[in-house]
Image (tube, grey):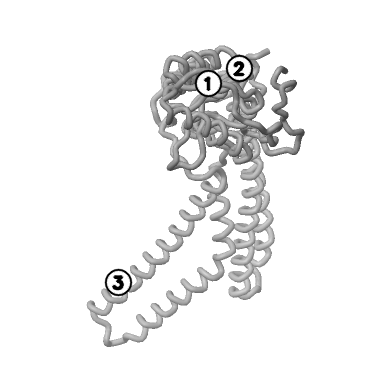
Amino acid sequence: MSGEKTEKPTAKRRKESRKEGQVARTQELGGWVALLVVGFAMPTLLSHELTAIRDLMVTCFTLGDHATTGRALILLSQAGKHLLVSLVVLGSGVMLLGVGSTVAQGGFYLAPKSVKPKWSKLDPIKGAKRIFGPHALWEGAKMLLKSSLVALMAYGAIKAVMPLIGGLVPIQTVVSTATSRALGLIRNIGLVGLGMAGADYAVQRRRIGKQTRMSKHDVREEHRQSEGDPMVKGAIRARQLAMARSRMMADVATADVVLVNPTHVAVALRYDSQRGAPTVVARGAGVIAARIRELATAESVPLVRDVPLARALYRSTKVGQEIPAELFAAVAQVLAFVISRRTRGQRGGQHRSPRSEGELPEVPVAGRRRRPGPRVSSSPAHARR
């Protein structure tokens, strides 16, 4: 059925879904990545902070009798600045990791439509579907699985440290082992969280893919809207052709000669010595050719009957183009005949071609590449055909 959404979303549909906030994205990736990076960077951070605390304590103990309120305030200010810088650096790193992971999933985009109030969001039926639907079940299963895995890993880490507490093991060994276990726990939780985030991203991508699917009717409607209504486009094209044909007919009066077939094809040429080569100002076959002959007769433009030359010009040129170089010599003979009559004050009329050559060189069809072919004959037998 055409109403079933079985088609993949088009580029326009994906763009609209992004504006509505429908992007395959998991919100947990940034937090797990930040936790994993912090777990690997924690030894360096702790070493740096412990060194700073030790230096501060040494400075405080070495003051002795020289301790004053002013020096205490200076030390407190230095400690506060160090703490502030450390927190800003750590917070900025976590923020950059979160933003980078979000952008990596679907790019940076703004979804203004997602923040607009919609009455459909207050529909209790749709709200119940969201609460008890497949998405809610997946969220619950994901939360349960994460809690179980984190509890198991934490239990393993605590169980490994418990034998060291309360025994004869030196405190430094206990602290070192506990620190190592804690850092390992953070890293393992981060790795497990990344795996869960990958699974959540796959589920979100599948869900968004189903929501943005389109029916065949939707695809056809979008194509029609983007490409335009065929009837409107046809009407516009017909009007453009009519206007171009009107301009072409108006240019017949400016032609120097019209080569005819004598009834099927007509090509009007205009020669401008400044441009060098004659230009086609009008061309047509059938009814259009008859109209060109009528306008040429009314405007006293001479009609020259030359079947092979008219056909060759009709096939190889468009309106506004110069004639092919292969036909320069043949057209020059016709123009010389027309210009000689004009100098004697003779205009218009129907005439036979003054050319004496028996054949014309083959010219490529307008809009196609040149291909070798037989030569067009201008013999009387060919003219009769």
Q: Position of residue 348 (x, y in %)?
A: 46, 20
Is 352 situated above or below 56? above
Quadrant into which the N terminus falls: top right
**SS class of the residue under badge 1?**
strand
Name the mark nearer the viewer: 2 or 3: 2
Q: Are marks 2 and 3 in contact (CB under 8 Å)?
A: no
Mark pair 3, 1: CA separation: 104 Å
- Whether residue 236 is visible here, answered yes or no, is no
Type of amino acid at the residue the image marks with label 3: Ser
Q: Is residue 301 left or right of residue 69?
A: right
Q: Residues within 10 Å of mark 2 (few under 14, many from 20)?
A: some
Task: Choose between 52 and 125: the one closer to the eye.
Answer: 125
Type of amino acid at the residue the image marks with label 2: Pro
Is 49 situated above or below 303? below
Instruction: Give the residue number, with chain letter if any, for mark 1.
Output: 303
Residue occupying the point 53% across, 36% down: 322
**SS class of the residue under badge 2?**
loop
Is 162 situated above or below 66? above
Farthest residue to the front: give it: 344
User: Which of the 4 image quarters holds residue 172?
Assistant: bottom right
Q: Position of residue 81 (x, y in %)?
A: 34, 69
Q: Are marks 1 and 2 in contact (CB under 8 Å)?
A: yes
Instruction: Give the residue number, with chain letter if any, for mark 2.
Output: 262
Is 325 situated above or below 157? above
In the picture, the disc for residue 77 is 3
Q: Which circle's residue, 1 or 2, is located before the other in the chain?
A: 2
Q: Residues within 10 Å of mark 3 (few under 14, many from 20)?
A: few
Mark pair 1, 2: CA separation: 9 Å
